[in-house]
Image (spheres, rainbow, N blue to C red):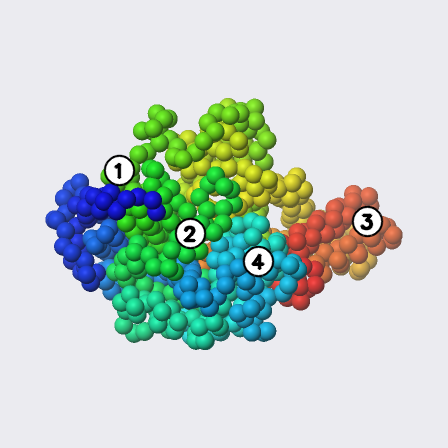
Amino acid sequence: MNGSRPALFGLALALAALLPLAAAPVAGATEGPTAGPADLGGLVDRTVAEQLRRDRIPGAAVAVVSGEQVLLRGYGVADTGAGTPVDPERTGFYLGSLAKLFTAQAAAQLVADGRIDPAADVNRYLPPADRIPDSYPGRPVTTDHLLTHTSGFDSDLVGVNSATPDGIPSLAQSLADHRPARVRPPGTLAAYDNYGAALAGLAVERVAGRPYAEQLRSAVLEPLGMARTSFEQPHPAAIAPARGYRPDGADGWTEEHGQYGPWTPSGPGGITTAADMARWLRDQLAPGPAARLMQTTHYRQDPRLPGLGWAYEGWTRDGFTGWFKDGDLPGFHGNLLLLPEQHLGVYVVYNGDGTDGTAGWDGKQLIRAIVDALPGGHPPADRDGSGSGSGDVGGRGNGDGNGDGGRYAGTYLAARVSRGSMMRTEELFGAVTVTAEAAGLRTEGLALDPRNPVQHWRPLGDGQYLESGGQARIAFRDGVLSASDNPSTGYRRLTWRQQPGPRLAVLGAALAVLLAALVAVPATALVRRLRRRPAHPLPARAARAAAALAGLLAAGFLVSLLALVADGNAMMEAVPLGTPLALAPTWWGAAVPPVALAVAAGAVAGWLRHWWRWPGRLAMTAVALAGAVLTGFLADYHLIAGPLGALLG
């Protein structure tokens, strides 16, 4: 922080004039002036009320801290059935990945005390049973890697969470049971990593000599007076949790589950109130050694863009720079921002996914609106007349126009996408496309706003681009796309062989052939019977029945997969819980390989024994090839359940 103390004091006074005090203030907060139509409290009230109405979200809570001034707000209901209103002092909201901030804080305290060396092999702090494999000799995973999403683990969250807080395995046991492969050397690429954060929590647990939740309570929560925050499962009876929902039908909600689980250091299980988060924000804004470690840039995917602190992401807007983190669990979406130089902290959380999954974006929009209202900001339009952009960038107009933009066109995939679980299917539907256009570049799939996936970018030079009409930036370096709005994940450029388009086209052709067999086989058998033609030999009829069965399995797989991806909100609940909705495609997939093998055997026998005429033999060959293609796809994307899936995967 490089602002002078008198300047900070003056800005704090200006901010204080905008912050009315909530009816239930955080202890130690001083009373502010009455809210007026132009103050920050009014802005928050109007914005959140409109979001809840427009996006069908039951409730929300907000905490804004500026110096000693605190704004607390509760909106809507915590329980749609009981009609319980949200109370910012008492209503508990699940933290989701905001829990990673507390894990980083606990680890940073141990670092500051000299009990953890953040550059040492994390295995030093783990007993033999908990240690991770030495997949890259000479390149160990460190605590610093774990807290900056650069440890190089694959991602697999299938079945990790729980619908209830009962019977949850220990953190150590779950990490051992769900240990993913190390897929890249640590420190080489940012890839959002829940397993890494949970492993950092285990290191805290082992070094501190007590369970993670107990260490957090003793070292963080009690000293800050955060009496209604807990990482225990079940939670203390004094905490009244809100229920999480997703929109259902025209005007209803469906309650969601899956907020619990053993990986508490990375997200599930942690719960807090807006008032307690205000206490935590104030502590972060008056940082001690641990908070300073958290709020230091430890990794940058691209040196021109914001980097990563410990659990924090660098953030910039209107010339202000700070630290950001969001957190999501089924039905709960929180966003948090610190502007240390302005001594401002904001926390907003919703207990609903919102229509089209917009609640997470709504929180970011509210934070942006608050920052835009701050005195002293200088949006890029004030400096260069462009009406868009972000400060502190150089190299305007050094090439990278339409002629050079083609160098970066292609398909990119987030490094966090799984390689070793059914979550790999995300690459088929979640890739980012970059296209050159007259003014620069066009991207689809990179935007944080789920309703507006397309963005346009104008060149700044040297592989860096600025969002048209916005302030986000992207940069290209060594085949990796980095985005200022998402520093915790790099995007790797795919080769033509890795492109999802051709794979989906081949899969589509195979499914079309198999679905045609489902219709054609019984239809031709019926026609043959009606025309009183001699029956084929029993083996031939069995081969054709296998072809029809392969078509039925293909149909079942396709329907179950489409049912899973049709509702992103429901999928977010189903996959971590490992529900039938999530696993159904793998159950259908498990039956495909043996049936496909039977079809292939029948096709070969049909040629050798002349069971059918040429069209029939060619048709069976096509079905056999389609079955082989589908089997290969299912194996490649880990969509075959059971031992056979383990063998083929």
Q: In this rendering, does residue 101 appear at all?
A: yes
Residue tagged by mark 2? 296
On screen, residue 254 versus residue 506, left or right, reads: left
The answer to the question of whether label 1 and label 2 lie on touching residues, with beta carbons closer than 8 A, is: no
First along the sequence among labels 3 and 4: 4
- Residue at point 35%, 64% (across, down): 271
* Residue 95 percent coordinates (x, y): 37, 60
First along the sequence among labels 3 and 1: 1
Residue tagged by mark 3? 612
First along the sequence among labels 4 and 1: 4
First along the sequence among labels 2 and 3: 2
| Quarter of the image with the C terminus in it | bottom right
Residue tagged by mark 4? 153
- Residue at point 56%, 71% (across, down): 130
Q: What crowding class fits label 2: few (fewer than 14 Cα within 10 Å), some (14-19), or many (20 or more)?
A: some
Q: What crowding class fits label 1: few (fewer than 14 Cα within 10 Å), some (14-19), or many (20 or more)?
A: few
Q: In this rendering, does residue 73 appear at all?
A: no
Q: CA distance from mark 3 to mark 1?
A: 82 Å
Mark nearer the viewer, 1 or 2? 2
The residue type indicated by label 3 comes to: Trp
Residue tagged by mark 1? 376
